[in-house]
Image (cartoon, rainbow, N blue to C red):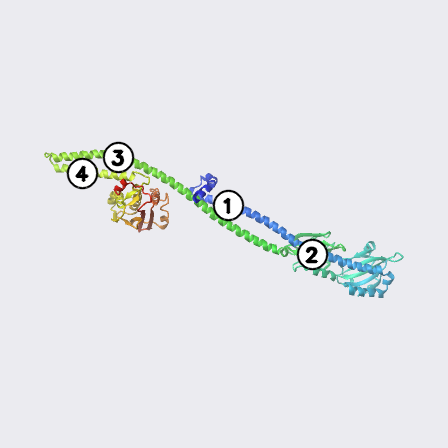
Amino acid sequence: MNRFSILKYLSRPFKRGLLDYQKDIHPTKRYGVLKKKITILMILVTIIPLLTMASLNYYQYQANMKREVLTPIRLMMHKSVHSFDLLLEERLSTVRSIAASHSFEFLSNDANLNRLYRIFKKEFGGFVDLGVIDNNGNQVAYAGPYDLLGKDYSEQSWFHEANVKGFYISDVFMGYRDFPHIAIAVQQFNKDGQAWFLRATLDTKIFDRIIAAMNVEPESDAFLVNSNGTIQTHSKFYGNILDQLTLPIQTRSYGLLMRETEDPLGKGKILIAISSLTTADYLLVVIKSQSVLLKSWYALQSEMLLILIAGSVLIVLAVIKISDFLVNQLKDADERREFAIRELEHTHKLSSIGRLAAGVAHEINNPMAIVDQKAGLLKDLIEIDGKISEKDKFLKITDSIINSVDRCKTITHRLLGFARRMEVHFENLDVNHVLTEVLGFLEKEALYRKIIIDLQLSPTLPPIASDKGQLQQVLLNIVTNSFAAVPDGGTISITSQQIDSERISVTIGDNGCGMPPETLSHIFEPFFSTKKGSGTGLGLSITYGIIKKLGGDIKVDSKVDEGTTFTVFLKIHQQKTGVSDGEKSTAGG
């Protein structure tokens, strides 16, 4: 099965599904509609799976990328919360160990308390001062840079909380010191059961060191807040210490909580990670910009989008090309089928006309034979009878009758020779003789219109193997077109010559109106005619088909207002001529 047969087989469902209901569409627009529908269908069939796959990959990669991004944040949060808890537990344990290992009386001594204060400040760091507070809330001993001896804490909330819980870790506050710090207080009892408290103040720089160790990006932020949303450590973007946090966060959080929200500062989407400390009423807050977190994802997203767009463009271009190719193949197939049907109809019509012409010629030949015989007999009688007056006049009349009868015989003989058969039947022919016969059909028109026919026929032209009737039809069609193209008094030149050992050529040129290039490119197409209202557009297309059937070729050159030249190339020998010896003896007759 050749390519044309395969395309014709594959095109059947398209034609049934897409053309059957388009019968009301104009034929010139039908193929454009078909091309549009095939293009849309193929684009949908290819683009929809591509978009589906791209969407699935997009969300899958996005989810995986977010997991990859969030995992380091979770690890960092766990480590940082653990560091804060460890620091506070260590400081709380240190204060507890001092209170447990020394009596109230020992610590109430300023010298003893100052010695312990210097040791703690040197060994642990971060301690601002130490104070011993009795059961009534009075500070009975103090070691530190401020004058706080004798201060009364009985009305403060931390004193009551420490009295109930046994210890207390405060929020960050300024106090008399005017710099951020926190207080840690533990409860102890004397031998007589009286409660007393050891209170230590710590600098919050120890918190800043842990946050700095988190190594957050310059575009990110990390800080502590208390359960009321008050900032406890310095924030890069969202406020200073003791400012109220404007971000909507869940302050009563247990464990790690992560969520996305819009940045109130207009930086786009941000990721907020919140984790509560177990030792104190603090929450660690880490804020990262989505553009920073998903920088690699955005780069991959851009590449994926570029690939998707490029792939879609290539698919659309390929679909357009394929659709154009398929529709052109369908159009060519339909045109060939229509041309074949038209040619078959025309052949049948010519065959019918040929049979009619043969019958008419046969019927005319019979009475013409009788007239010829009677005229001959009359001539003989006139010549024998010497008594007839004006004998020469009657002889001229009988000769005129006989010559007219011979002319009728010649015309009917040509008509029978032209319409004898339509199928290809090769025989040896003298092309010059065929040309002379064809011109015989048009000699009256040439005389009437004073058209000059310039014959330059090669006397050494070899006979060729071809079909006489169809070759006559080809030459007659071309010469008739030349007659139609030239004005009265015009010139038609006909040349025959041998090109090589395999081919001869017949050139028919005129000095008529000529044709523009756009017309010249369509003259062999079926139903294309320049004779508006009078031509069928089949003459040259049938001529072209016959020439190809006879194994030859045809070329045309034309210029507007200069004329047109047709050149017919014919093979001298055919592979299988089918010529008998009897036919060879009558070649050229």
Q: Quadrant of the N terminus?
A: top left
Residue 546 placement, left or right of 92: left
Amino acid type at mark 4: Ser
Q: Nearer the viewer, residue 254 or 428?
A: 428
Q: Secondary structure at mark 2?
A: helix
Q: Secondary structure at mark 4?
A: helix
Q: Which residue is mark 3?
A: 362
Q: Nearer the viewer, residue 6 or 161?
A: 6
Distance in Å between CA atoms under marks 4 and 2: 128 Å
Is 391 above or below relative to 478? above
Circles 4, 2 touching at the beta carbon (< 8 Å) = no
Foreground tag (1 vs 3) = 3
Distance in Å between CA atoms under marks 1 and 3: 63 Å
Q: How many marks can you see?
A: 4
**Mark 1 Cα shell of 10 Å, populated few (<14), some (14-19), many (≥20):** some
Residue at 34% over, 37% down: 348
Q: Which residue is mark 2?
A: 76
Foreground tag (4 vs 2) = 2
Q: Position of residue 85 (x, y in %)?
A: 75, 57
Q: Which residue is mark 1?
A: 42
Distance in Å between CA atoms under marks 2 and 3: 114 Å
**Does residue 240 show up?**
no
**Does residue 585 show up?**
yes
Amino acid type at mark 1: Met
**Mark 3 Cα shell of 10 Å, populated few (<14), some (14-19), many (≥20):** some
**Mark 2 Cα shell of 10 Å, populated few (<14), some (14-19), many (≥20):** some
Q: Which residue is mark 4?
A: 400
| Mark with earlier residue (1, 3) | 1
Q: Position of residue 175 (x, y in %)?
A: 78, 61
